Image (cartoon, rainbow, N blue to C red):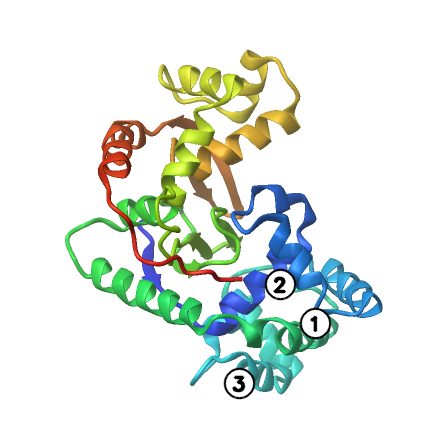
């Protein structure tokens, strides 16, 4: 059964995504913003406040706000969403959760209250101060994606282009996929997965590089290709599609190291990640080489070498 694909964006999506990016310490090394951004944000909060927020974020580890944001009526600013979300009855919370065919946690009301509290604190000290061009750029990206969805390109192809290499195959239960542009977690792509719906937040490079500096996409490509192990992985994937277990077996290094290298290759768009949705399961099936990324590398390098001075850099924190 084919799934329906749509684009969505609201400021509260990016607020929640930025919060997750900050507290997901294991991903800090992979973020374009990197540790300087993390350090800058830390300085905005008292240590005791940060510790209290960490406790709440850990409690919310398996809880996704995406279905609630998607269902929220009217303007979905952070303040408006939190007012609406905090006012939902327990029955309304369960109804929205059940609509995605997700298993509803017994402590749903507690999770809602924790989410509202931590998001309010995050918005007050960080998110309300971000460059407004981030939200404007993400809104423009979502609008552009909506127009492309009305064309002849298939939903599966649009999903792959938006996520820079993730191919989502139809399943017997999956009915809807919602694509949401995000900025803070770039170049990572994250998904909230339910039996009948998937919410995928994909990365957007919204601002030009400083004059004379390479674009982020070119940097990711060249960095990904500069490592011996990653080149060995790509050589394997050039021959056939492989599972994570097969790659680990053939490269003969630890799973955590292979995982790290695959993150870099995925961020660069050098691999296709084949996903198959099957009833309540949603797992990576196989990886393969994404040749179009390699084919376009020469042109990107030529354009960079031949380019003149770009516009003044945009510094966004």
The disc placed on residue 236 is none
* Measured Cα–Cα span from mark 1 to mark 2: 9 Å
Asked if residue 215 lies left or right of residue 201, the reply is left
Q: Do the residues under discs 1 and 2 have CB atoms within 8 angstroms?
A: yes
- Residue 54 percent coordinates (x, y): 76, 61
Q: Is residue 32 above or below residue 145?
A: above
The residue that label 3 is drawn on is 80
Of the pair 116 and 11, the residue shown nearer to us? 11
The residue that label 1 is drawn on is 118
Asked if residue 282 lies left or right of residue 289, the reply is right
Name the residue: 46% across, 31% down: 223
Image quadrant of residue 57? bottom right
Of the pair 161 and 132, the residue shown nearer to us? 132
Asked whether residue 284 is in view, the answer is: yes
* Measured Cα–Cα span from mark 3 to mark 2: 18 Å
- Residue 194 percent coordinates (x, y): 52, 55
Q: Residues within 10 Å of mark 1 (few under 14, many from 20)?
A: many
The disc placed on residue 19 is 2
* Circle nearer the N terminus (1, 2): 2
Q: Secondary structure at mark 3?
A: helix
- Residue 11 percent coordinates (x, y): 47, 73
Which quadrant is the C terminus positioned in?
bottom right
Name the residue: 48% across, 79% down: 72
Asked whether residue 286 is in view, the answer is: no
* Measured Cα–Cα span from mark 1 to mark 3: 15 Å
Specify the farthest residue to the right.
Answer: 48
Name the residue: 58% across, 31% down: 259
* Circle nearer the N terminus (1, 3): 3
């Amino acid at each position: 059964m084919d799934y329906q694909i749509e684009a969505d964006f609201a400021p509260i999506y990016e607020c929640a995504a930025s919060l997750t990016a900050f507290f997901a310490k294991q991903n800090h090394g992979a973020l374009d913003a990197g540790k300087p951004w993390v350090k800058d944000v830390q300085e905005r909060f008292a240590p005791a406040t940060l510790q209290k927020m960490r406790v709440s974020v850990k409690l919310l580890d398996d809880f996704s706000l995406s279905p609630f944001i998607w269902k929220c009526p009217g303007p979905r600013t952070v303040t408006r969403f939190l007012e609406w979300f905090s006012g939902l009855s327990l029955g309304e919370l369960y109804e929205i959760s059940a609509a995605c065919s997700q298993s509803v946690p017994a402590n749903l009301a507690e999770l809602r209250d924790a989410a509202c509290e931590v998001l309010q604190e995050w918005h007050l000290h960080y998110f309300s101060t971000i460059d407004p061009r981030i939200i404007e750029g993400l809104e423009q990206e979502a609008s552009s994606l909506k127009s492309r969805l009305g064309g002849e390109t298939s939903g599966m192809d649009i999903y792959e282009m938006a996520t820079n290499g993730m191919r989502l195959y139809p399943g017997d239960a999956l009915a809807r996929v919602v694509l949401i542009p995000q900025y803070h977690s770039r170049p990572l792509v994250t998904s909230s997965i339910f039996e009948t719906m998937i919410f995928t937040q994909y990365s957007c490079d919204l601002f030009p590089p400083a004059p004379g500096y390479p674009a982020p996409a070119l940097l990711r490509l060249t960095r990904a290709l500069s490592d011996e192990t990653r080149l060995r992985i790509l050589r394997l994937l050039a021959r056939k599609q492989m599972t994570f277990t097969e790659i680990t077996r053939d490269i003969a290094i630890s799973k955590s190291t292979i995982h790290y290298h695959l993150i870099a290759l995925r961020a660069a768009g050098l691999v296709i990640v084949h996903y198959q949705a099957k009833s309540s399961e949603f797992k990576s099936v196989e990886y393969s080489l994404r040749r179009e990324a390699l084919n376009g590398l020469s042109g990107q390098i030529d354009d960079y070498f031949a380019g003149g001075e770009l516009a003044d850099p945009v510094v966004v924190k």
